[in-house]
Image: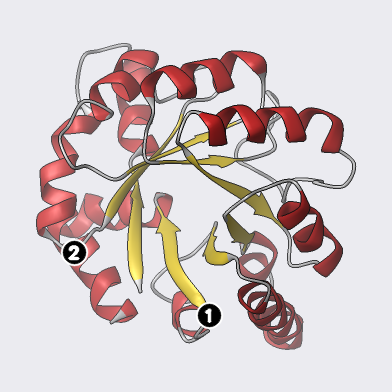
């Protein structure tokens, strides 16, 4: 199973003080050396952490698998088509939210998602849709031409006990269904060392994208060790 390391919150620390440090790109070599397989960065419309220059520099690093998270707006689609990262993940985005609160409504958003996906596919960018574990949404993702879905694990991470087991079953069923339909299946959001093992055990999942927990753990044990711990768990 692959580990995508989200470096947004390294940029968050920089933006809080308006300094030039820490530079999120300084983490790339550490991530790859410590077991990370790709770098994820979310260029938000409000630029609260990752900046345009960060994303542009990421996309110039030779052979780096960059996954650009973004809203499916004309601005972001245009930036992505210009930069041509290997992959992008379309996510819902609200300015007032602290972090992404749920999956895309692919069915309700077909009118704007269909042309966005078509543009990105034409530019050679592999498109992933960040969605909840719902078969109707998965079917629509296939119809619109996405190669990948990323299952939203935030609901799973936010509950405990039987409610978590119920969410885990939904994720397992969705992964099995999506893989059976020919999609590449990823997962992410709210994953920590404590709650990741059951997700990592889902055989159809090919990649987990983790960021906040890695950066939080890194405050106490260093970035290299934090990434190594998550990668060892996935292995």
Residue 195: image location, x then y, percent: 50, 76
In the picture, the disc for residue 204 is 1
Q: Is residue 112 above or below residue 109?
A: above
Count residues near mark 2 (Cα–Cα under 10 Å), then give few for <14, some for 14-19, many for 20+. many
Count residues near mark 1 (Cα–Cα under 10 Å), then give few for <14, some for 14-19, many for 20+. many
Q: Nearer the viewer, mark 2 or mark 1?
A: 1
Residue 90 located left or right of residue 224 = right
Residue 112: image location, x then y, percent: 79, 28
Quadrant position of the N terminus in the picture: bottom left
Identify the residue position indicated by label 2 in the image: 35
Is residue 6 visible in the rendered structure shown here? yes
Q: Is residue 112 above or below residue 7?
A: above
SS label for mark 2: loop
Rendered image quadrant of residue 25:
top left
Residue 39: image location, x then y, percent: 31, 45
Which residue is most to the right?
A: 108
Q: Residue at x 61, y 70 (%)?
A: 182
Which of marks 1 and 2 precedes in the sequence?
A: 2
Between marks 2 and 1, how big is the CA–CA gap? 20 Å
- Comparing 91 with 65, the one in front is 65
- Comparing 116 with 224, the one in front is 116
Quadrant position of the C terminus in the picture: bottom left
Q: Residue at x 66, y 70 (%)?
A: 156
């Amino acid at each position: 199973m692959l580990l995508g390391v989200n470096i947004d919150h390294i940029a968050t620390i920089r933006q809080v003080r308006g300094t030039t440090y820490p530079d999120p790109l300084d983490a790339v070599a550490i991530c790859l050396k410590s077991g990370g397989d790709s770098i994820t960065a979310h260029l938000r419309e409000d630029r609260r952490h990752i900046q345009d220059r960060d994303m542009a520099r990421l996309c110039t690093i030779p052979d780096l698998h960059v996954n650009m998270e973004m809203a499916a707006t004309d601005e972001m689609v245009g930036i992505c088509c210009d930069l041509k990262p290997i992959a992008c993940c379309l996510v819902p985005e609200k300015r007032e939210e602290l972090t992404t609160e749920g999956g895309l409504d692919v069915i309700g958003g077909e009118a704007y998602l269909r042309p966005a996906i078509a543009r990105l596919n034409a530019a050679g960018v592999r498109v992933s849709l960040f969605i909840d574990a719902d078969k109707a949404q998965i079917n629509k993702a296939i119809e619109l031409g996405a190669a990948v879905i990323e299952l939203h694990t935030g609901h799973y991470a936010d509950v405990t006990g039987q409610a978590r087991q119920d969410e885990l079953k939904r994720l397992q069923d969705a992964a099995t269904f999506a893989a059976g339909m020919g999609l590449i299946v990823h997962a992410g959001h709210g994953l920590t060392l404590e709650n990741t093992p059951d997700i990592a055990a889902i055989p159809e999942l090919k990649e987990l994208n983790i960021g906040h927990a890695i950066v939080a753990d890194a405050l106490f044990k260093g970035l290299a060790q934090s990434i190594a711990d998550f990668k060892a768990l996935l292995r």
